[in-house]
Structures are given as C-alpha cells and as structure tokens.
Image (cartoon, rainbow, N blue to C red):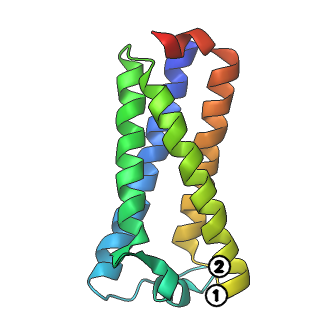
Amino acid sequence: MRKAAWLSVGIATLAFVGMVDASYVALHSSRGFLIPCGLAGGCDQVLNSPYAAVAGIPVAWFGLAFYLTTAGCALFALFGFGQALRLSFVLVSLALGFTVYLFYLQAFVIRAFCDYCLLSALLVTLIFVLHLWSRRHFPREQET
C-alpha cells in the first residue's frame, strides 16, 4: 500500500471514531437522556448549555455530518480521487476553527468540560495534522 494511502486510511479511521462519538452524543442529547461523563465530569453542563445547539440543532449533529463527509472524502482519496482531500482539508480547517471556539466556550464561559467534546476536539486536531502532513509530503497525490 502506498504511503499516501495509509494517510487516507488514518483520516478515515479517525473520522469513524468521530462518527461514533458524535452519533452517541447526538442521539442521547436529542432524546433528553443524561450522558454519563467520566474524567471531565461536566457533560451535563456543556450539553445543556445554550451553546450546545445552533438554530435549534444540537452541535453533535453538525459534528456527525462533518465526520461522515471527512470519512467519505478519505475513502474517495483512497480509491484514486486525491482531490477529495482538498474538500476535506477545507472542511477540517473550518471544523478546527469551530472546535477552538467550542473549547473556549467550555473553558471560559461554561467553565465545564465534556469528555465527548474533548475527544472530538482531539480527533479534529489529529485529522487536521494528518492533512497538513499529507500536503507537505504528498502534494501530487491531491492533484490526481
């Protein structure tokens, strides 16, 4: 397998973990269920805050759409459509900016952290780093 293919597999794998995380939060919070929180202990405060939804739609649903699209782009790139990574890079860049904003809200406005949100922030950051790495080491792969 080409080295660039491993990169697509890595992005798709991280996006799949993100899909599981986002769908768990989206389904449970949409139905009003309490989500057990581990280390951070502030899931209830974060997920029930006014910042947990945009236009009445829980942020987790946007996260699920992002991870599905990112996984799809990575799979298209794996099968030879390297330009799909360009779209994915734009989406990941926007998601990273939104993630930083959400992290700021947790830290300084809500003053509580959600384990699932922190996992998502880590995944978005790792996907962004993989994209940067691929753009530096495999620039031609994204042109095919």
Q: Which mark is residue 110?
A: 1
| Residue found at x 71% / y 79% | 107
Q: Which residue is mark 2?
A: 106
| Residue found at x 29% / y 80% | 30
Give whichever of 126, 61 is nearer the camera.
61
Q: Secondary structure at mark 2?
A: helix
Mark 2: give few (<14), some (14-19) or many (20+) Cα within 10 Å.
many
Q: Give the vertical position of 80 relative to 73 (above or below).
A: above
Q: Outermost residue toward the front? A: 55
Q: Secondary structure at mark 1?
A: helix
| Residue found at x 48% / y 87% | 50
The image quarter containing residue 64 is bottom left
Give whichever of 123, 38 is nearer the camera.
123
* Residue type beneath disc 2: Gln
- Callout 1–callout 2 Cβ contact below 8 Å: yes
| Residue found at x 57% / y 15% | 3
